[in-house]
Image (cartoon, coloured by chain):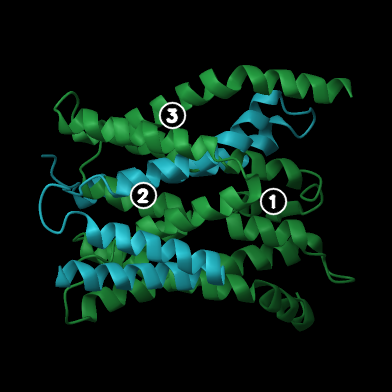
Amino acid sequence: MNKAYFTSAVKTTLPVFFGYIAIGIPFGLIIVNAGYPAWVAPVMSAVMYAGAGQYIAVGLFAAGASLGTIALTELLVNIRHIVYGLSLITKFKNVGKWKPYLIFALTDETYSILTGCDVPEGADAGKYYGTIALLDQAYWIAGSAIGAAAGKLIPFSLTGVDFALTALFAVLLIEQLEKSRDFLPPVIGAAAAVAAVLLARFGVMPSGNILIAALAFGIAALILIRGRSFGKTSDAEVRK
Amino acid sequence: MNSQLTLAAVLSAVFVSALVILATRAFPFLLFSRRNPPRIICFIEKYIPPMVMAILVVYCLKDIRFESKPWGLPSFTALAFTTVLHLWRRNPMISIFGGTIVYMILSRML
């Protein structure tokens, strides 16, 4: 890869640099605050590489969740990814040996860059996309490592830094609502979660099951309320 | 109460989570490279992510005790602050840092 392509890739990923450093730092802080060694943060960023997925994982570790609960939660938190690839199938047809890494590294931010950017003239598509994806992941690993190191050095108590998790989910929710303008799914989700929290508080089920129960209630309610009408509207769209 | 996971359990959970996340990302490339996706995929795309995010927000607030001091005030104030900040500046970095700082200050004061 010559220098011009690399510079172009760096420029393209600059917004992600700021975002990943800023959101990676609180992640590193939370890991250390939960009592785990600092290196766990960059390791998670290297092998899992999923913002919301990593944040929620720390909460599950701290709550002593079972492996099955963690796996199912990660599946549902990351389920939006199953649709990301759909719009990149054609674009990834001629990226050669970069394809496995590009698929592994397909975060929300890298997805939005790759769907929006054009390969500079004369550049190899695989190399160019791969460089973008690698840069993004490097920013993320750096951010979480900085946060974890800072967490070990900062002399005052970091209690409350895990609110960054709540804030991140709130921000993601606002951005999804802006796109969909459909308040029913989050209202269903919030009601399902409140119901699950209450069930745990009144001792009906253990508190370790709150998240799974909420997801199950939410999906069931969505299918009941939206399942049938969704089938009908898409039939109508097909007929048009 | 459940106690928190040991380091060994965390590492195996990280490994399993990594596989699950990779599976979600590889799914469309493995299944739909040659044929069109079924409608259920559109249903998932449209409705599941915003529902899951709302669940996660509530889940994060699950340990609040409304009956005793500080009555959940730090969390709800910081959440409102995050929301206003995000609607105003549209910058996740500012919203997340701002909300967290407000929470850390209020939870020490109240």
Left or right of residue A43: residue A87: right
Query: Which chain appears cyan?
Result: B
Residue B102: x and y, percent? 31, 71
Residue A108: x and y, percent? 59, 55
Mark 2 Cα-neighbour bin, 10 Å: few <14, some 14–19, many ≥20? many
- Give me the C-alpha separation between circle 3 and circle 2: 18 Å
- Residue that appears at 45% across and 60% down: A46
Q: Amino acid at mark 2?
A: Ile
Under circle 2, the secondary element is: helix
Q: Amino acid at mark 3?
A: Gly
Answer whether labels 3 and 1 touch (C-beta < 8 Å).
Answer: no
Residue B25: x and y, percent? 59, 43
The picture quadrant where one finds residue B91 is bottom right
Find residue A218 and name its label: 3
Provide the residue designation for mark 1. A99
Residues at marks 3 and 1 on the same chain:
yes
- Residue that appears at 23% across and 73% down: B105
First reached walking from the N terminus: tag 1 or tag 2 = 2
Q: Is residue A69 visible?
A: no
Q: Nearer the viewer, residue B10 or A202?
A: A202
Q: Is residue A187 visible?
A: yes
